[in-house]
Image (cartoon, rainbow, N blue to C red):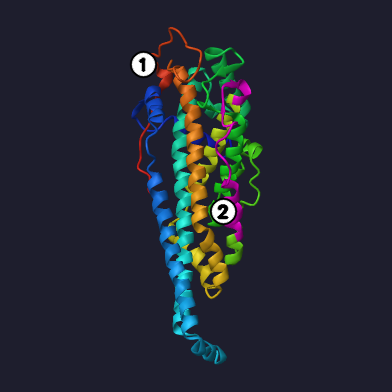
Amino acid sequence: MVLGGSYHDLRVNNIIKKGNTTMLFTDIMNDINSGDVNIHDVYAEEATQQINVACSVFEYAMSLAEAEEATDRVVQEAAEDMGLPTRAIQEAADLACDSVVKELTGLYGVVVSNAKKVKAATDRDLKAIIALGKKNNLSAADAGSDFAKSYARPLAQALTREYGKGKSLSFVSGVFPSARKTHDMTLAFGNAIARLATVFGISVSSAASDPTVKKQLSLGGTGGESAGDISALYKQVTKGTMFAKMSYSGDQASSTSASVSDIADVITYLYVVNQIASAVAENAGSAKKAENYVASLCKGNGSDMRKLSAINDKAKDWAESINAAASAIVKVFSDAAAALGNIALGKTKGVTEYVIEGYELDPSDDVFVYDEQVEPEAE
């Protein structure tokens, strides 16, 4: 998604204008303020439950193997001496392998569903940011190759000039995310979702090549390298989820005085996360393709319980980390868009200590009007 190139222009323009259904800025803000449930939460939960069930089946397979070994040790030893497999042990191994395939397929569903969740939420947030830019005669589609310098910073300057003291905006504690914390969350989520997508062969090269994304993230190792065996896949997933494991709260989570640079940075990070989530969501293949891929690795190592157990022991934790990271990143950017948008609407109570007197939004003001055609997304 190279900013200034045709693909970026298409992405930005698709956020700004779709079809012929009228959507006002107030509608966008009502959507953000309502905090409505994202449909992709349902799919992420289904994928997480698939992992939980598969983990239970794996534990049963392990119990079956251990019980057979304990009660029929003589038979086991005789069979091994003759080079023959024992029926129950082989069935247990096959069941364990099938369970891990289901776990990893479920993890694929968690990754893709959360990418779609973040894309949908940040698309909505960007609509508000683009609307604020349009009100100040700024166009995201015309930003060129440097979104931060050509769009985010001029918009931040305009907002602080109109609604603050010229150099900063004052917020009630907990309302606007700090640039520092948002930066850390962008690094964590961006690296996690990009690397985990690559594990399943989902290309993120369009986002990785975006000049603005490249300035904020180093997405080396996301070129589509495939694991050659189950151990390599375990290492890739472990590395990807390590990025998602961070604290999303604390003293530095919000800012009561956001400078021009702080606001510009938060807007830029919103753009970066949107680009990465969009690349994953739009390039994801089918769950069956992912299942066939992990099955080809697991089947070749199905008799090695240690390798399969390593995945089973971590699968639930992996899913939990991804779900938590996605929910946190959605909240932080929704908070940012809500804070800036509500000030523009004159809804300053509980947002900023400065009350803008006599400011009224004309609902017919065409700079706040967008055309949008809502199309159902296939999961």
Which amino acid lies under the numbered mark 1 shown in the image of this protein?
A: Ser
Q: Quadrant of the N terminus?
A: top right
Name the foreground residue: 64 vs 218. 64
Which amino acid lies under the numbered mark 2 shown in the image of this protein?
A: Thr
Upstream in the sequence, badge 1 or badge 2?
2
Question: Which stretch is magenta?
Answer: 235-262
Dot 1 lies on which element? loop
The residue singled out by tag 2 in the image is: 198
In the image, residue 357 sits, relative to residue 56, either above or below, namely above
Please tell me whether mark 1 or mark 2 is closer to you in this view. 2
In the image, residue 232 sits, relative to residue 209, either above or below, namely below
- The CA span between labels 1 and 2 is 45 Å
The residue singled out by tag 1 in the image is: 364
Q: Is residue 67 left or right of residue 306?
A: left
Q: Residues within 10 Å of mark 2 (few under 14, many from 20)?
A: many
Percent x, y for residue 268? 58, 31
Dot 2 lies on which element? helix
Q: Is residue 7 visible?
A: no
Outermost residue, front side: 71
Residue drawn at (62%, 15%), measured in percent from left and top? 167
